[in-house]
Image: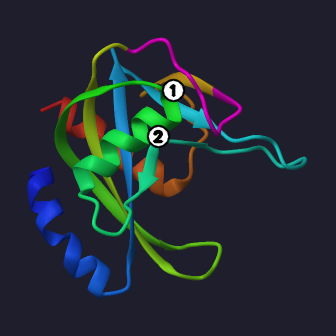
Amino acid sequence: MSVSMFDEALPRGERDGVGLRVGAIIDRGGEVLLLEAHSTGPLPLTRKLPGATVEPGESVSAALIRGVREETGLTVTGIGHHIGDFDYLSPAGKPVRRLHFAVEVAATSPIVLSAHADYVWAPLDGELLVTPSIRGILEAYKDLLSH
């Protein structure tokens, strides 16, 4: 499914009361960019993919481009495959659907973080320290690469 099909489906998601978020898989030779939040205590933090909330009236592709730029400073030059999505409840208890896409960027550096403590280029076949939902997305991405 192309990103334009998601852009067209956006008003339905708004009507259904499901918040939309997007996540970007940025690949640098078999390593993916993962962001680390600021520590809030003794529990180990999980890493996340760059992304953003789709604002009212904003297209999925525009949110993806904006989210990557705001969170990493990188410029998206292409949006590739839809890798997968999952639903969850926000901390406020509202339903959210997170759509994930492989993206191409003009350059993989420099990374300029705005809201995260650190980042890592993690090998797809290594220890990723991500949630089970993100692990599933990255497994689907790995499967896509192997075909």
Q: Residue at x 76, y 40 (%)?
A: 38
Mark 1 or mark 2, which is nearer to you? Answer: 2
Q: Residue at x 60, y 82 (%)?
A: 93
Relative to the observer, which residue lies in front, 45 or 77?
A: 77
In the rendered view, does 30 fall on the left or right side of 60? Answer: right
The image position of residue 108, as x and y in percent, is 39, 15
Residues packed near mark 1 inside 10 Å, few (<14), some (14 to 19) or many (20 plus)? few
The disc labelled 1 sits on which kind of residue?
Answer: Gly
The disc labelled 2 sits on which kind of residue?
Answer: Pro
86 magenta-colored: no
The image position of residue 41, as x and y in percent, is 89, 49
In the rendered view, does 120 fall on the left or right side of 4? Answer: right
The image position of residue 146, as x and y in percent, is 19, 30
Which numbered tag is attached to residue 126? 1
- Rounded to the nearest angstrom, the CA distance separating label 1 from label 2 is 19 Å
Considering only vertical position in the picture, is 39 above or below 9?
Answer: above
110 magenta-colored: yes
Residues packed near mark 2 inside 10 Å, few (<14), some (14 to 19) or many (20 plus)? many
Q: Quadrant of the N terminus?
A: bottom left
Q: Residue at x 65, y 45 (%)?
A: 46
Q: Main secondary structure of the magenta part?
A: loop
Q: Which residues are magenta?
A: 108-118
The residue tagged with tag 2: helix, strand or loop?
loop
The residue tagged with tag 1: helix, strand or loop?
loop
Q: Which residue is mark 2?
A: 50
Relative to the observer, which residue lies in front, 44 or 91?
A: 91
Earlier along the polypeptide chain: callout 1 or callout 2? 2
Relative to the observer, which residue lies in front, 65 or 141?
A: 65
Q: Quadrant of the C terminus?
A: top left
Q: Residue furthest front?
A: 57
The image position of residue 112, as x and y in percent, is 56, 22
